[in-house]
Amino acid sequence: MTRLIQYDDSPPHGARGRLDDHGAIAAILEPTGVRLERWEAGATLSPDAADAEIMAAYAEDIERLKARGGYRSCDIAKMTPDHPDREAMRAKFLAEHVHDDDEVRFFVEGAGLFYIRFGGTVHALECTAGDLIVLPAGTPHWFDTGERPRFTAIRLFTTPEGWVARFTGDEIARAVPLYQGAA
């Protein structure tokens, strides 16, 4: 289930509210240009499904997104609790950063937590299977897989260079609670 917890972006970074209504969450995020949609993630995939198999299962969705957003390429981000690099991969995006390109993710399995910072608030958005999130270029955010990650997401790009993270240097990600994993 998609969830949103809002935290103050200034000390002591207290939690202000919690929502699990998808429509209400999308409405809160909309003024910043962040788009949250509910799509069907119904393909049956084997636990060891190859990237090509995942892309084939969601080919229509991928083409629709490419046409709508001008995205030229895509890949698969997949993380499991037994992945040998899970700790390093988690740490890589636990600092606030921005991209020169939109960040587009369609979660087809599992869950992960985006922290999106705007309007004096950190919006901790748990995305689950079926969630499509589009963070506009330049949106300050970070992402947490949790200690025992389990997710598969289709990522779309306009250019490979646009997806490179530019870290803001702000330490706020250290002050807001980490993702405990899907409930």
Image: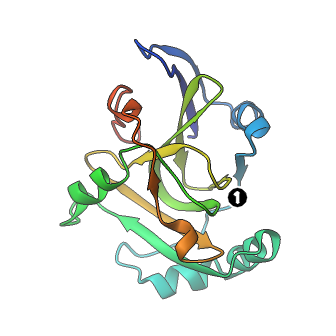
The image position of residue 117, as x and y in percent, is: 56, 34
Q: Is residue 121 above or below residue 45?
A: above
The amino acid at mark 1 is Trp
Answer above or below: position of 161 versus 95. Answer: below
Residue lying furthest front:
169
Q: Is residue 131 above or below residue 25?
A: below
Q: Residue furthest right?
A: 68
Check disc 1 and report its element: helix, strand or loop.
Answer: loop
Q: Is residue 39 visible?
A: yes
The front one of 35 and 20 is 35
Q: Is residue 92 left or right of residue 27?
A: left
The residue depicted at 68 percent of the width and 76 percent of the height is 62
Measured along the vertical axis of the image, is residue 105 above or below residue 11?
below
Q: Position of residue 104 (x, y in %)?
A: 62, 61
The answer to which image quadrant residue 69 occupies is bottom right
Q: Classify mark 1: residues with Cα within 10 Å, few (<14), some (14-19) or many (20+).
A: some
Q: Position of residue 57 (x, y in %)?
A: 60, 80
The residue that mark 1 highlights is 39
User: With 21 as the anchor, is 161 left or right in this view?
Assistant: left
**x%, y% of residue 33?**
75, 45
- Position of the N terminus, as image quadrant, is top right
**Residue in the foreground of this view, choosing between 101 and 1:** 101
Q: Residue at x 61, y 73 (%)?
A: 157
Please give left or right for residue 8 compared with residue 135 in the image.
left
Please name the residue shown 51% across and 64% down the image.
Answer: 153
Tell me which corner region of the image, top left, top right, bottom left or bottom right, holds residue 66: bottom right
Residue drawn at x 65%, y 60% as measured from the top left = 102
Q: Is residue 113 visible?
A: no
